[in-house]
Amino acid sequence: MANGERRVGTVSRGIRCPIIRKDDDLAKIVTDSVLEAAQFENFDINDRDVISITESIVARAQGNYATVDDIASDVNNKLGGGTVGVIFPILSRNRFAICLKGIAKGVKKVVLMLSYPSDEVGNCLVSLDKIDEAGVNPYSDVLTLEKYRELFGENKHEFTGVDYVEYYCNLVKECGAEVEIIFANQPKAILEYTDCIINCDIHTRNRTKRILREAGAKVVCGLDDIMNAPVNGSGYNAKYGLLGSNKSTEDTIKLFPNECKDLVLDIQKRIFDATNKHVEVMVYGDGAFKDPQGKIWELADPVVSPAFTDGLIGTPNELKLKYLADNDFKDLSGEELKKAISESIKAKQDNFVGNMASQGTTPRQLTDLIGSLCDLTSGSGDKGTPVVLVQGYFDNYTN
């Protein structure tokens, strides 16, 4: 290799693992799988490599599941079992349908308030063009189901082909509850129908709770307040409740993993004991990125990473190479340019706020960036790689 230099930067490897079941020793399985992959594929484990584990197998190893009846019991106890407003849910069979089943089984009537023209993560109910044509102001106008159908008819999801308005309506009825559907974007609109509310929004949930409580709501629970403790011996999530959950079976939900800092620390130690290398370890769920065609924001989990080692705290601290090449060193080329840029990187400060040479370098949380990379690497289907090894992420042009 010329000059002994590396020719590869960041590498993301999907690591194959056995199918994980409840009570499996996940720390051992992950450690063994990474070390075996390194041996089989003939690569080294290095300091500051990142081992990422999908939240799904963590929750499965924890046995963190709940049934529709568990949800129904919790909802009934916390909201009284009468007429309950269910507001701002996302449109998802995987993410919300089982939650809605449990809610419906625990109450007499559901007033389902859907945000429009799309849900929180970008799933579209009706196009903005149709909203414009109808002269509707989605910020202020409240639509009944009849008015929605009159103006917009049936609207099937671009990717799934499901009319979620009809799907959610039928699902509630099948669970034995009455249902009324309205469309609004102001949280207070639900108070015209009931003062007991479950707000199902993810990233705006605290604001929505505040608005409803200040407006006089009797009971306000977020999805994070449902299944935040065991019900009849069920799984639970103390911090996030039903947020981050996924459909497991038609009547069972897999919850977001419970506290798992001990897991990432255990794996970090096991790798160090085996290799004398200090790696970082994180648990990841959805990545944080947006699909340009469907306009869907991927992040339906409350956070990208519920647990990570301390070396992953913070944001990147990087210089923009093209800015340096086009501005500071525009008159240099070849080895002279390379040397000048390398010296700039070596001399860089800890904080680049206001420095043009850092503009556009995406100052997001490291766990959000690496988790997004890992989510794209592992996929959501049949790749069979629930562990991702990221190498060289913290390298720069000088390495």
Image (cartoon, rainbow, N blue to C red):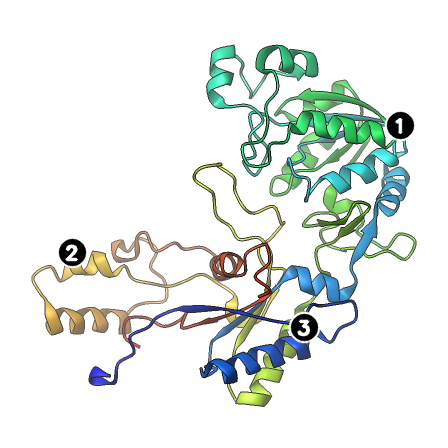
What kind of residue is marked 3? Leu
Furthest-right residue in this view: 232
Residue under the point 90% across and 32% down = 81
Vertical placement of 283 versus 81: above or below?
Answer: below
On screen, residue 9 versus residue 30, left or right, reads left
Whether residue 220 is visible: yes
Residue for badge 3: 263
Contact (Cβ within 8 Å) of mark 2 with mark 1: no
**Residue 54 coordinates in the image, percent (x, y):** 61, 62
User: Cα distance, mark 3 to mark 2?
Assistant: 45 Å
**Residue 138 coordinates in the image, percent (x, y):** 56, 20
Mark 2 crowd level (few <14, some 14–19, many ≥20, 10 Å Cα): few
Q: Secondary structure at mark 3?
A: helix
* Of 203 and 155, the residue lying toward us: 155
Residue 74's quadrant in the figure?
Answer: top right
Residue 265's quadrant in the figure?
Answer: bottom right
Vertical placement of 211 versus 375: above or below?
Answer: above
Residue for badge 1: 108
User: Cα distance, mark 1 to mark 3?
Assistant: 42 Å
* Of 337 and 64, the residue lying toward us: 64
Compare marks 1 and 3 and give the one earlier in the sequence. 1
Q: Quadrant of the C terminus?
A: bottom left
User: Cα distance, mark 2 to mark 1?
Assistant: 66 Å
Vertical placement of 158 versus 58: above or below?
Answer: above
Residue for badge 2: 326
Whether residue 215 is visible: no
Compare marks 3 and 2 and give the one earlier in the sequence. 3
How many numbered badges does the structure rendering display?
A: 3
**Residue 285 coordinates in the image, percent (x, y):** 60, 56
